[in-house]
Image (tube, helix red, strand yellow):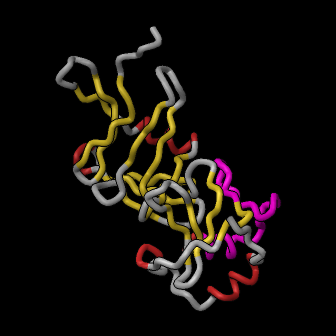
Amino acid sequence: MRHSTLDPETLASQLSSAPSLPPVEHWNPPLNGEMDLRITRDGVWHHEGTPIQREALVRLFASILRCDADGHHYLVTPVEKWRIQVDDAPFLAVRLDADGIGHGQRLLFTTNLGDRVSTGPTHPLTVEYLGPGGEPSPYIHVRGRLRALLTRAVFLELVELGEERPTTNGNGDYGVWSEGMFFSLGRLDDESG
């Protein structure tokens, strides 16, 4: 696999005239190799081990980011495709705005890079647990196969908006409503004790 000698600043200058969200899902260039670009779990983008300080550059890269069916993340242009490393999710949900209550509630998340998505059928909310009693990893779908990890503070706000819903097996399900859909945050039958 070829490693990139492409500099982020050079790529940015090539993309500067691109629309804010180009149609990366429809572009199918061949894989050029791997770029030494990593997005850590805390949402920081690193090039060659150094955090990228220019937010405009990170936003530009995020606009051409795609996650393919193979689970890998790529920066994609009409003519190039570079694999990058993403530790968890490429975005963080850093703000939650709630409007309404119950079935009529609407939850709007804002990411660290300015994406705003309303939880619903197009942007579902999921919570994964790494084993019984494990810490929750809550995500909101952003676009394509890309999702944002909710920060701890945002998840705690979300939990405060939750309600219990009975299930058919007698255990409770705790979750939130948005756009008329119920999104589970986890079971209430505490397995730890």
Q: Which residue is drawn at 78% across and 75% down?
A: 5
Image quadrant occupied by the N terminus: bottom right
Q: 80 above or below 187? A: below
Residue 43, image x and y in percent? 65, 54
Q: Which residue is drawn at 26% across and 54% down?
A: 179
Total marks shown come to 0
Q: Is residue 21 magenta?
A: no
Segment colored magenta = 38-61
Residue drawn at x 59%, y 79% as measured from the top left = 80
Q: Image check: 11 left or right of 118? A: right
Q: In which quarter of the image is residue 123?
A: bottom left
Give how far across and how far down residue 48 sits, in percent.
80, 62
Q: Tell me: residue 99, above or below residue 24.
A: above
- Looking at the image, the residue that sits furthest to the bottom is 17
Q: In which quarter of the image is the C terminus?
A: top left
Does 190 sit left or right of 179 as displayed? Answer: right
Going by the picture, which residue comes out furthest to the left?
A: 168
Q: In this view, does 88 lie to the left or right of 173?
A: right
Q: Estimate the x, y position of residue 159 in percent, counting from the top left.
A: 43, 36
